[in-house]
Amino acid sequence: NARLRGKVPPPKAIQETHCSEVSEAEHYAEMYRYRFREYRFQETKGPQEAYVQLSELCHKWIQPKSKSAAWIADLLIIEQFLEILPHDVQTWVRRNRPDTGSKAVSLAEYFLAIKEHAQCSKLVRPPGCPVREKCRAGKAGSGIMTSRTTNALS
């Protein structure tokens, strides 16, 4: 199968980096995660081959020999959390590559707050991207840092 052997490139979203460099190991883990999730039975000669290829992709993605059971569980919870998010939120959170559940939740909450307060002035991207700092002087406790509120904090 060409996808299993790495001949079919992953979608552009997987190739993009945002805010900081992504290590080669993280890039390949994301690529194998994508291939594992997108693998279809029709790509195989039968159930045995499908199971073997899914197993190979999963082990390349998760690398269970070098990870704890808690880490693997957290990874699966993050993955499922991302799957249940609305598509636009899911895409944005994935692009920011959260490595913990709390980061994934913070990113999703931030994105939803941006959507809710779209009328706010241009957002400021503070150091430490992708997670933005919450503003104490924001619009009605919105928690969004804008150019207006950063001036108020100065």
Image (cartoon, rainbow, N blue to C red):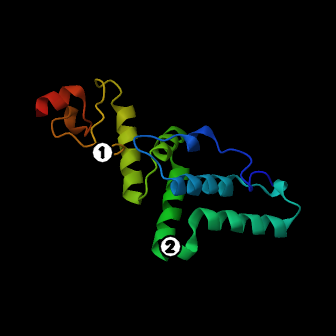
**Can you tell which mark lies on residue 128?**
1
Q: What residue sits right under mark 2 in the picture?
A: 67
Q: In the visual, does 105 lie left or right of 64?
A: left
User: How many residues crowd around disc 2 within 10 Å: few (fewer than 14), some, or many (20 or more)?
Assistant: few
Name the image quarter holding the C terminus. top left
Disc 1 from disc 2: Cα separation: 27 Å
Q: Is residue 154 above or below residue 6?
A: above
Q: Residue 106, position in %: x, y?
A: 35, 49
What secondary structure is found at the residue carrying circle 1? loop
Q: Nearer the viewer, residue 33 or 144?
A: 33
What secondary structure is found at the residue carrying circle 2? loop
Residue at image location 48% in from the left, 53% down from the top: 23
Q: In the visual, does 109 lie left or right of 89?
A: left
Residue kind at label 1, given as amino acid type = Gly
Q: Is residue 125 above or below residue 3?
A: above
Name the image quarter holding the N terminus. bottom right
Residue at image location 33% in from the left, 45% down from the top: 131
**Label 1 close to label 2 by CB (< 8 Å):** no
